[in-house]
Image (spheres, helix red, strand yellow):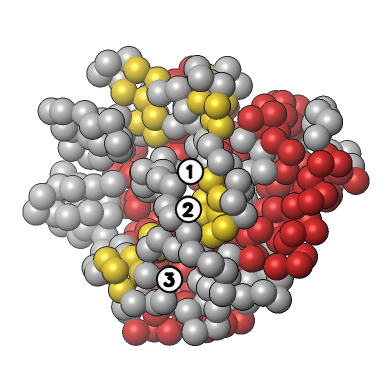
Amino acid sequence: MAIGQNKMTVTYSKPLRRYWWLIGLLIALMGLSGCRQQTTVKPPKQAPSGFVVTTKYAADSKQQRQRLANFIKRGLLTKQGLYTNYLDTAKRTTATASGHEMLSESSGMWLQYLATTHQWAQFRQFYRQTKTTFDEKGLFSYRYDPRAKKRYSVNATLDDLRVIRALLTYDEARQTTHYRQEAAQRYQTLAQTTIKNGHLVDYYDVHSHKAATTASLAYFDMQTLKYFEQETKSGRQAYHKQLIVLKGGYLGDVFPLYAKSYQWTTATYSSGNLNTSEALETLLHLAEIKQLKATSRRWLIQRVTKRDLANGYTTSGTVSVGGESAANYALAAAIFAQLHDRKHYQLAMKNVWRLQVDQADSAIDGGIGDAKTKQVYSYSNLTALNAAFY
């Protein structure tokens, strides 16, 4: 439901191939019984930190940035949210959002842009509208269809964390406490639904009151989780348990990415193919807390340098989905920025701008998409825009 509108599925798992971390994982999971009492999440005593992008590597791409932002405002942005696609569709599908449906994922990414660029009034107004469009009993519905005025009953944990992170970014950048209480309240709802007892899962259905049992590793936004879980002993334990699960998904030095997901009920990792955007989100979350492996960094440098970062891989490292995506290069750029690797950041962004439409007479000029078909996706455009402000 998040990461460019990928449908959540439970995949079959295979026996674990590495054992060096297994003892630690089992010990951590056994300790969950001690964290089952419900606790109230309060705003941490210390102000948000580490959420604001402080490096400015992309000064030489100011024109591309502005053209991209202009297209998003012109072609995707509405008062209610952002269109999933530039072109609308006649029919809707249950599995994925399309056309002029809207995703809370996109709204969270736009809020991040507004906070990063210090557009304070626009941020406050758009956040108010985000709640009007997506709020569903304290969670953000992952999807809204303005044609049918339908709000879906499930959230996507990463999408909620995106919005919460944007609130924290606003307060850190402006040196205020404007949103800290609200961010804590929204995290409290997650702690009672999709991060209950230290088990981060993909979604919660507010109508059936049932949560998923699977956790996409791309959803483990460790920096945001750490901010809220640092105040209490049980919170710190929950954070470390989630980190153990995340790091336990490492596929090995030959193909140094991470499994797609983890099944809490069986304590097994998925053997399903990797969506590259999800895989890179996982690497970015690790880089943000300084836990990215050198092997993963080297692999990413090779892919960006050779310009062969595919859209999907098997767990053994062979390409399962060909082609390339500006969003993937943008995620790579964000990872390199976190590593203070200016050279490869700029190389990755060069590949992003290579895929930008540069046709003054085109309706999607400045956007990331196909100039002939006018197929434009909000995720690619917003990921590229946020990466361009490191």
Give the mark nearer the N terminus: 3 vs 2: 3
- Secondary structure found at label 3: loop
Tell me the crowding category of disc 1: few under 14, some 14 to 19, or many 20 or more residues within 10 angstroms, Cα based. many
Task: Answer whether labels 1 and 3 touch (C-beta < 8 Å).
Answer: no
- Secondary structure found at label 1: helix
Q: CA distance from mark 1 to mark 3?
A: 28 Å
Residue at the disc numbered 3: 315
- Secondary structure found at label 2: helix
- Picture coordinates of residue 165 (x, y %)? 63, 42
Q: CA distance from mark 1 to mark 2?
A: 8 Å
Considering depth in this image, is 73 or 180 the residue closer to the camera? 180
| Residue lying at 65% horizontally and 65% vertically, measured from the top left | 247
Considering depth in this image, is 110 or 143 the residue closer to the camera? 143
Residue 355 in the image: above or below residue 369: below
- Picture coordinates of residue 266 (x, y %)? 59, 51
Residue 1 seen in the current view: yes
Q: Nearer the viewer, mark 1 or mark 3?
A: 3
What amino acid is labelled 2 in the image? Asn
Residue 298 in the image: above or below residue 28: below
Q: Nearer the viewer, mark 3 or mark 2?
A: 3
Residue at the disc numbered 1: 109
Residue at the disc numbered 2: 386
Residue 279 seen in the current view: no
Tell me the crowding category of disc 3: few under 14, some 14 to 19, or many 20 or more residues within 10 angstroms, Cα based. many
